[in-house]
Image (cartoon, coloured by chain):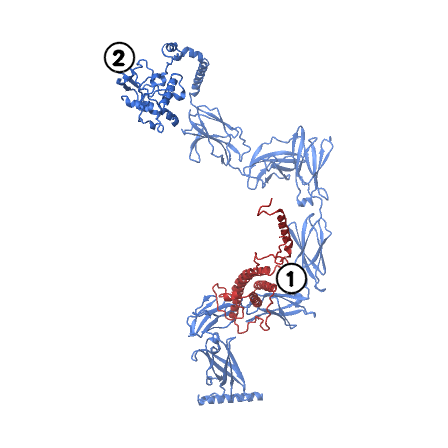
Amino acid sequence: MALFSVSQTAFLLAFLSLRTYQSEGLSEPLPWAPESLKVSVNTTCQCLHLQWTVHNLAHHQEFRMVFQIEISRIKTSNVIWVENYTTTVKWNQVLHWSWESKLPLECAKHFIRMRSAVDAAKTPGPRVWSSWSSWEEADVQNSLGQDPLFIFPKDKLVEEGSNVTICYVSKSHQNNISCYLEGVRMQGEQLDPNVSVFNLNHVAFIRETGTNIYCKPGQGDGIKGTVLFVSKVLQEPKDFSCETQDFMTLNCTWDPGSDTGLLKQLSQSYTLFESFSGKKTLCKPKSWCLWQVAPESQDMYNFTLTAENYLRKRSVHLLFNLTHRVHPMAPFNILFKNVSATSATMTWKVHSIGKYYTLLCQVELYGEGKVTQHNVSVKVDGAHLFSGLEPDTEYLAQVRCANGDYFWKWSEWTHQNFTTAEAAPSEAPDVWRNVKTVQGRCVVTLFWKPLSKPQAHGKILFYNIVIEYLDRTSVSEVLSIPAPASGTELPLNQCSSQIRITASNSVGTSPASVLVVSREPGNEEVEEERVKGTEDGFPLSWNPQPRHVTGYLVEWCEQPRDPPCDLQWKNLGPNVTSTVVSSDAFRPGVRYNFRIYGISTERVPYLLARKTGYSQELAPSDNPQVVMTNLTSHSFTLSWKNYSTESQTSFIQGYHVYLKSKAGRCHSGSEKAVLSDDVVCCKYKIDNPEQKTFVVENLQPESFYEFLVTPYTSVGEGPHDAFAKVTTPDEYSPTLIRILLPTVFCILLIMITCYLKSQWMKEKCYPDIPDPYKSSVLSLIKSKENPHLTIMNIKDCVPDSIEVLNKQEGTRKSLTETESTKPTYLYLLPTEKRYSSPGPCICFENFTYNQAASDSASCGHVPVPPKAPPSQLGLLTSPENLLKALEKNYMNSLGEIPAGETSLNYVSQLASPMSGDMSNLPTNPPEPALCSEYKMQMAIPLGLASPPSSGSSSLSSITLLDEGEHYH
Amino acid sequence: MLPAAGEPAAGDSWGLLACLCTVLWHLPAVPALNRTGDPGPGPSIQKTYDLTRYLEHQLRSLAGTYLNYLGPPFNEPDFNPPRLGAETLPRATVNLDVWRSLNDKLRLTQNYEAYSHLLCYLRGLNRQAATAELRRSLAHFCTSLQGLLGSIAGVMAALGYPLPQPLPGTEPTWAPGPAHSDFLQKMDDFWLLKELQTWLWRSAKDFNRLKKKMQPPAAAVTLPLEAHGF
């Protein structure tokens, strides 16, 4: 207490003296002003570190003082930071203060000064400050070195989302320096001529190797850069939890969140600290850690999990009792004992968690689509009896356990399958029959449905059939049909019999199904009724029977169109009089027939009703195949006897007969109908579906008709596609045919007769014409005058001109005087054209002319064969050769005329257009057209062919023609 | 009758045949042809050449991955920074005349020394890689490069050249000092990969030249036969 009063007195004295100083004037410095201010720079943390002292403090004197610190940037007047730092000051104490700069300290000069005051917060009045210390300069730029360009800060590590300021310092006074962040140019602000600053806000993590920032001067290839390491923000571990399986180790797990590892910074580390024991462990894995449970049975644990990286530290706590965190291991060694058809015992083992603990185990049984669950308390081994099981059924049993005293977590499931044993089938097989008579014997076909799994109680191996004949005349028969047969055909010795069918598996036999077969066919006269099917099936109903029945049975074929019709049946109780028969096999447009039987107490079935119907009626897809008969000029008959009304896609109500005609008139009994293609036609309606003939009458002769027969039902008609075509015959054509046919037959008969008697007809009607060659006159002439004379065929020569000779009566001139003879030609035909082609040239032997009067040169013209070879022509050019040729030709002409030498046999009768130059002959053979003009119509006598004396008058036709006169 | 000039007598034919048989009998003894036991350095030079080509291909993929890992501008195709701070890396580029004038021993020695240094640097690169996949790729490449180094040593041994012994204290180390900024370190990594690529390219040329040089001329085998029987 004394000490307190002394110090309080000293403080008051000092304060009063300070006040006194202040009141006396500001010129006097405050005695406790800061002195020896030193500023140092830490570029790693971009920190300014200040240290100073306060002098004039008395020994053991302590003051709580406020130091006002001012920091300026670039110049002293640019104050960027003012902070009051309050601390207790002792005698001879060195004071420290640090300030972290947002701007890298290398980027600008900083100036620092401070002043002090006694912290007199409790005393009223304004604070009395000491005078400012002098400005201290913090300049790192001087120590940078000689490089022309620097970028700051160097390789800084920040958290994602921080704001970072980058600057460059250029010592080469270049202004065109460009800076890039990850290849993208940055825009900065100039702090001074050599320094530019770039502010990066909310920087993001890009990669572990950091974000590259670099600057390039405008000239040169220098590049300066820095790497900004942006770390993800360290997250608090989530879902921190610890548990034990064996009271030996605790397994602590957590969700670490994102990894904050970088090239410059390792990933965050995790430390587990337990406060009761004071133990600590470094967890190498990132998401779990093992903790050894203390042997001295520590129950309570208080864990602190700390995640830590270079920038941050985060912790979570967990306090728990060890016995409340038991997570047992999965049970093992599941076994099934005493497995029968309906029960089984399951046993299993568990990993012990100590003798003082009880486990609660949960047992589940899956089978037959059901799940049952039981809880069992277990110390070491567990056991549970499953009862009420189905025979021959596979079950899945599984078990898991948890701490029974304090539930924390179930263990994993352990499961095992087992199958119960077989039992005898519980139900008699569902059996039906079909009875028919073959060659006087009853043949029964049995059908049965396989027993369902709950009924079979095992695999059915065979079916037993016992036939007992009711009149006891025959011995019973026993048959065994191996499974999986579903029916059999049995010829019976006698129709009246009772058949018992049982199914057997490896354990036993089912109850028997009993069928009684009687010779009476039953009430087959039952009238068939129509039934309309619905989406749910066919609703069938029948009248209740006055006599006692044990039940009813409905029978139908699921595939009525196929021969094995897939017989189905449905058993119904004795009180049931209606049912709905449904099946997935029912198809629209298929007619199904149902037969309903009543089963008497003697197990004899008798037919009660017959139903037929469609699950859905469909319009007919086909029309009947129509045959047309009795076609007359006014009618024809249509017939479709083969059309079955039973096998159609709906109930046929009748038929429509459509008739198209050009006249477009409809007679009585028909009505006009417009088809889908706007064609108007006549429609006849037939209401009876069994009437399958129709006579179309009142037609016009020689008219074209089209007709179609289509059935109609409650859901529509058949297609209107293929109209048949017919044309009615002419009304008179049958009469004509009756006349024409005999006429033609008669004519033919006459012609045949004429042909057969043609010789006789020829003799009688047109006898042969006499032949001149065979005439006797010719032989008379030959013998008297000239043996060479012959008769010329007139048809071979065509007279084209008549030569008129001016003949003097009484004078007969010699051959040399023939020059005076002037022949005159009268052309009958245009000869040049007519004889332009090669042809025979014939001289008439005209007996009316005098032989001596013939011009010696008139027939001297020797035509040359058109295609004569040059050698032959050459021979002809000489007079001797020519003479020979002439002789030969002339001789030939008197005899038989060879066919190929006709042109050489005759003297040419025309004037040749060729010149008389003989030398042209070989090269220019005369055209055959030279024979186109007659000159003299006489044969040359043999004596006239002698050559003339002069060479110039050679026997060429041209020469001869030039010398002689002729008229055109 | 004397045989006509130019037609060998029957006795001469037998002599020629005997001579041919003698030559065939002595062929295995001819030292110039008896090279089945020692194939020489040719195959190992070929293998080394093949290995350099394979490594070139392998490095192309690895460098792409690694430069993407460093980020821009190092993965930009036209990035060509000054070779600052990478002076300790063996330089592959050399004047063409100087390269031509290198003898075999010097050529192989330079290759061996270069890959020794580059392998050491590459292992340092592997140690600091952050991703496991990249470390796996780098480790695989280092193994291949170690194989190339062994192959070059094999060629040198086959030619009778001694392996260069590293001078004490000149072991290349991968220890970036505190003054070495991360950006400069990335630049060094860039230059290491680039220099490695250039060296592999140069080695392919070197071994191709050596391969051609070591091939024996096909028509240069002469048989010192004695003319027995002629």
Q: Which residue lies furthest to the front in this view?
A: B1
| Horizontal and vertical percent position of residue A231 | 53, 68
Q: Which chain's colour is red?
A: B
Residue depth check, mark 2 versus mark 1: number of the one nearer the observer: 2
Q: In this view, does A520 lie to the left or right of A939?
A: right
Q: In the rendered structure, the residue with mark 2 lies on which chain?
A: A
Q: Which mark is residue A409?
A: 1
Residue B122 shows in this picture: no
Q: Name the residue rendered at 62%, 51% in the picture.
A: B20
Q: Rounded to the nearest whole Å, what is the CA distance between mark 2 and mark 1?
A: 173 Å
Element class at badge 2:
loop
Image coordinates for residue A49, horizontal then vertical, percent: 51, 79
For the residue pair A35 and A900, the one nearer the viewer reads as A900
Give residue B50's quadrant in the image: bottom right
Q: Quick check: do tags 2 and 1 share a chain?
A: yes
Q: Quadrant of the N terminus of chain A?
A: bottom right
Q: Position of residue A459 (x, y in %)?
A: 69, 44
The numbered dot on residue B132 is: none
Q: Nearer the viewer, residue A106 or A704?
A: A106
> Percent position (x, y) of residue A750?
44, 14
Question: Within 10 angstroms of label 1, few (less than 14), some, or many (20 or more) residues?
Answer: some
- Image quarter (top left, top right, bottom left or bottom right) of the C terminus of chain A: top left
> Is residue A934 in view from this perspective?
yes
The three-letter code of the residue at mark 2 reads Thr
What color was chain A assigned in the picture? blue
Neighbour tally class for label 2: few under 14, some 14-19, many 20 plus, Cα within 10 Å: few
Question: Which residue position is annotated with label 2?
Answer: A811
